[in-house]
Amino acid sequence: MKINYTFYLLLILLAISCKTYEEMHYDILRPAEYSVPPEIKSIVIVDNSYPFVPDDAHIAHVMGDLIRLDTVNVDTFTSVVISNLRKELALRQFFDSVYSDTTRYNTIVGGSPYSVFSRSEINSICDKFNVDAVLSLEGTQYGTEINVMDMGAEYYATMDVDGLLFWRMYDRFLETPLYKTAQVDTLYWDGVGAGINHSAATFPSIEDAVVELGEYLGFGFADKIIPRWESVSRKLYTTGNPYFSSATEWMSKGNHYEAEKLWGYLYEKGKEKDKCKAANNIAISKEERGDLRDAMEWAYKSYQASELSGSITSGEERRTAKQLYLDLVRRFRDQKKLDKQVGGGQ
């Protein structure tokens, strides 16, 4: 059979030409949950958690039957959490110095769950490491649940490993902790196989899974006390009215202002179907310039235009407009918190 390559080339070109936007990708700074006081420039991470005894913490549901798995106690769980948290905090360079203490302050003999450090204990630890504050891991739990289901021709299995950590931050000057929070998260695996064992063949051992969970929780806790960079994508509309092409050229040259003038003209004088796209592009341009208030307002105009235009605007464009508006509202609200955490940096 003779293949018409020219026909397929035209289809490809047509598909490319139908794309009305370019994807823009860049990183934005998200604030931490807690704003560490600026006077705290150094910390030490300590283990003050009462030893967790995982009685009945690991179970499996196989074809409806409950099976209690061997009790697996991962003694290194807290040290894995603390080690990985220290690495992440050091990598982000938010504090001048970060240390970890290898002492287990809360033992089965003489200890108690979720105990709070006294002022003298905090002063002693701060003096020992010459730091401003103590970040204390004060409670841990973990557990595993495996489920296996008969799907007919094969078996489907899942493995969930859940973890709960409780943290407090102290400085040497206050009677009560600066900050306390619970951290909860889950790691997940799944598999398919011709037999029950085959379906779970790729799962890690319970001990390895708990260790991996500890690494994940340690890295993840940094987001609660240190701002993080997050990748976002934005749709910049580039085709349709010739003004879009001209504005895109100005943007490629780094001239946001000229591009915004053209999009502004389209928003005011252009056809109804162009208003949503033009306002969207102005919002993105202003966001990139760091003007979050104006960016948020133009994103709302884009969302409003998409809703008023009805069927003229596609469902995808309406979803894009709504998502951009919601995200810029979040960024605008976050900015005051970010200013407090990093001194106004973007």
Image (cartoon, grey):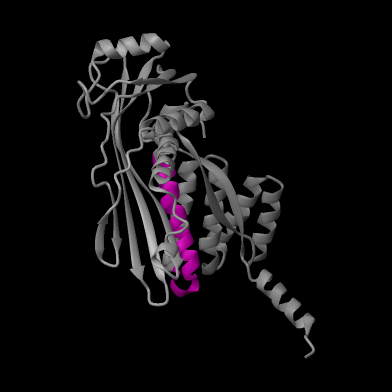
321 displayed left or right of 149: right
**Residue 317 highlighted magenta (yes or no):** yes
Q: Is residue 288 on the magenta stretch?
A: no
Q: Is residue 316 left or right of residue 242?
A: left
Query: Is residue 344 at all visible to an observer of this figure?
Result: no
Expressed as whole percent of the image width and height from the top left, the position of residue 137 reads 32, 28
Residue for point 72% across, 73% down: 13
Q: Is residue 190 above or below residue 315?
A: above
Is the N terminus in the top left, top right, bottom left or bottom right quadrant?
A: bottom right
Q: Is residue 131 above or below residue 179?
A: above
* Residue 29 seen in render: yes
Kindly report the secondary structure that dominates the magenta region of the rendered protein. helix
Q: Residue at x 68, y 69 (%)?
A: 16
First to last magenta residue range: 309-333
Quarter location, residue 212: top left
Res 74 quadrant in image:
top left
Q: Where residue 211 appears, x then y in whole percent? A: 42, 40
